[in-house]
Amino acid sequence: MIYLIFYILILIMLISNVMMMMSIILSKKSFMDREKCSPFECGFDPKSSARIPFSLHFFLITVIFLIFDVEIALILPIIPLFKMVNFIIWFKISLFFILILLLGLYHEWNQNMLNWTN
């Protein structure tokens, strides 16, 4: 039994190594692909100075997007919770969560974070 597991592990390692070698041999790399392989971040040239200032507003919009993206992931479990608990408890939990979202959206709107022309 131990020998069978040992042979299977060797076979897996052999197959993965053969596949990696085939991809290295068959891939077509050229000098033209250098731009595709370079990192891309917010439209900056990676070969220039890293201390160039960027738009703070762009950063704030990104943070807002991430916050709302995480909040949507937190809203999804509320749907199956509807069948598990009493309607009043479910309604209070949902209302509290939506209220927090709306207060955050109001604060962002009040701080002019949602206006792109600042």
Image (cartoon, grey):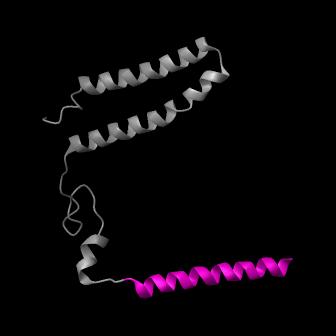
User: Where is residue 101, by image quadrant?
Assistant: top left
Residue at the location (54% across, 19% down)? Answer: 93
Quarter placement of the N terminus: bottom right
Which residue ends up furthest to the right in the rendered image? 1
Give coordinates of residue 62: x percent, y percent: 31, 43
Residue at the location (21% across, 57% down)? Answer: 43
Q: Nearer the viewer, residue 26 or 66?
A: 26
Q: Quick check: 86 left or right of 77?
A: right
Give coordinates of residue 76: x percent, y percent: 52, 32
Give coordinates of residue 15: x percent, y percent: 61, 82
Instruction: Kindly report the secondary structure that dominates the magenta region of the rendered protein.
Output: helix
Which residue ends up furthest to the left in the rendered image? 117
Q: Quick check: 37 left or right of 67?
A: left
Residue at the location (24% across, 83% down)? Answer: 31
Query: How many numbered marks appear?
Result: 0
Which residue ends up furthest to the bottom in the rendered image? 25
Q: Is residue 96 above or below residue 116?
A: above
Q: Is residue 42 above or below residue 103?
A: below
Quarter placement of the C terminus: top left
Q: Nearer the viewer, residue 2 or 80?
A: 80
Q: Is residue 79 magenta?
A: no
Q: Quick check: 12 left or right of 104?
A: right
User: Where is residue 8, by image quadrant?
Assistant: bottom right
Part of the protein shown in magenta: 1-27
Q: Which of 104 and 13 is in front in this view?
A: 13
Q: Quick check: 18 left or right of 30?
A: right
Residue at the location (84% across, 78% down)? Answer: 2
Give coordinates of residue 11: x percent, y percent: 68, 82
User: Where is residue 7, by image quadrant?
Assistant: bottom right
Q: Is residue 24 magenta?
A: yes
